[in-house]
Image (spheres, rainbow, N blue to C red):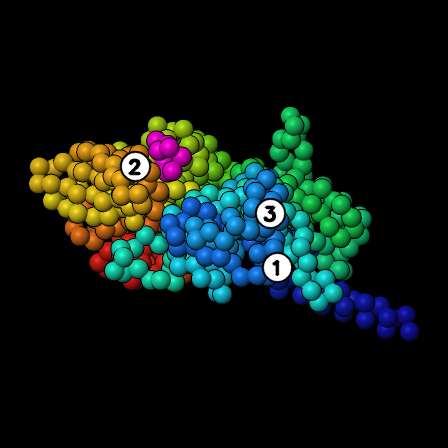
Amino acid sequence: MLSVLACWLIALSGCAQIAVRHQSPEALAEAAAEAELVSDLTVPYGIHPHVVHSTGLVVGLPGTGSDPALGPGRQTMVEEIQRHGVPQADAFLSSPNTALVNVRAMIPPGAQKGDRIDVEVLVPRESQTTSLADGRLLETRLREFVRLGGRYREGHVMALAKGSLLVDPAPEQERNPESQLRARILGGAVAVKPRPLGLTLRPSARSIRNSRRIGTAINKRFYTKQHGRTVGVANPKSDEYIDLIVHPRYKDNIQRYLEVLRSVAVGEAETQRRSRVALLSRQLLDSITTRAAALRLEALGEHGREALHTGLNSSNSEVRFHAAEALAYLDDPEAAAVLAEAVRDSAAFRAGALAALAVMDSPEAYDALVNLLDSRSVEARYGAFHALWKLNPGHPLVRGEDLNGTLTLHQVRSEGPALIHVTRSRRPEVVVFGSEITFLTPMVVDAGRHIMINGDASGQVRLTRFSTDDSERTVHVSNRLEDVIRAIVDLGGSYADVVDALSQARASRSLDCRLAVDALPSRGRPNRRTEGQMAESDTRSPQAADDAGASGLGRLRPASWPAAEPGEP
């Protein structure tokens, strides 16, 4: 019996040796490098935009408002007006110069107290209001609403909204009546509470021990300053939830922040980490696994830097981009040149490359962004301006001139083609690329409902504001773009009036340069994987792809915003 057992053990040992011999070195390395990641134990919490809304009151309308019907909305607004000490609230609300509106905003993930958010203003279906143009929203408290017992109930005040309305500034003959019943206030709401962001432990992993292990692993990699103290970003609250502080470097890219956090290893030994770095180094060079490998190397911090540097020298542009993107969040200056290449040449990677350059605090990143201001791509130029402004709003190239709080006028020195950029999100701004842009005269255009612009053949421009009391106010300026914009604002014109004038001038060929709207590139564009060249979103050239779909003119504007240039949808 013992001899049979001995033979069986010898045979089993031999089989095991054969099985081990047949495993490849790569398989052995992968088995040795297996690590438990935060993503194995948690799911993110607070990653979706949070909608808040309320009823508000618009004032200052030129007789286009209406007396709201009796109902909860009207009663709420009467109480709100009385709270502000306005006498005869009912009479005030009944004026044709006011309108009851629905107000809402979307608070993004990770938003902090004091952050500014765009506001949407809508006229209710049953209202008799015909236009919100020239209106101003009184301060409105935006609340969350929660569903309890089958009914929606008011929650906490999450933001305060107010400001001048931006309505579709199309010419009268092209104006869509419905478009006059919706408006925006750019950056018009201020968050009064932070949005919670965290990690929820999976049911199978819930324990105080795991919550602390995860918090410890994250805090070894990510920490920040609060009230002069260095603190970790993870705060285990219970056996099922870990609260997160947003690291400043990722404040504008919450999705990547959570991806990197969840790529952190929990309880990894030194030898295991070295084996995993070796495996990730190989995976980084494969276009199929390069993005996931780059995120995990970024999560390793300094331990992943050397491997990421090898990716910068790859012949595969996708590998180069993902390695450079990860290095940018490690503030490595060698990433700048590769990211600038991606901005110039790849519609698919442009948004990620610009976001990465915007978090780098190095001369190389500044130089790369300044050079991109001369690019032929509209997205690259405005994206570089926007990244520079986020890095340092006081930078001489992007500082801008505040025009009576109505808008900011930025004049950017650039060797590229003349370009004017306006926005309908974030903040009211006009960005002028190039110098000495002038209106071609003679011309006649309107700036909103009350201002007429008339340029004569000599290059002089007369702006006249008409009032409801038949009075007029006239100013004369040169045909230089900046002079005309300043004059519109000085006459009491709004940001929408300025955009209206630019749109009409471009349509009538009185403005001989490109006019773009919200030309920041979008994320999530598909790409073709190619060896040795940047991966493009389609088979066209990078400039053609930019012209056709990257400027935002068709994607983000209401029906009558400035028309797309030839070649755009």
Residue position for label 2: 491
* Residue at mark 3 to residue at mark 1: CA–CA distance: 12 Å
The image quarter in which residue 569 lies: bottom left
Could you tell me the amino acid type at mark 2?
Leu
Q: Position of residue 316 (x, y in %)?
A: 39, 52
Report the disc number at residue 72.
Answer: 1
Residue position for label 3: 80
Q: Tell me: residue 122, above or below residue 327.
A: below
Q: Position of residue 537 (x, y in %)?
A: 35, 59
Q: Which of marks 2 and 3 is nearer the N terminus?
A: 3
In what element is the residue under mark 2?
Answer: loop
**Residue at x-position 59% and y-position 50%:** 78
Q: Which of marks 3 and 1 is nearer the N terminus?
A: 1
Q: Is residue 129 toward the left or the right of residue 196 in the image?
A: left
Q: Is residue 78 toward the left or the right of residue 547 in the image?
A: right
Magenta range: 400-408
Could you tell me the amino acid type at mark 1?
Pro
Q: Residues within 10 Å of mark 1 (few under 14, many from 20)?
A: few
Looking at the rendered image, the disc whose residue lies closer to the viewer, 1 or 2, is: 1
Is any atom of residue 472 visible in this view?
A: yes
Q: Earlier in the sequence, mark 1 or mark 2?
A: 1
The image quarter in which residue 129 lies: bottom left
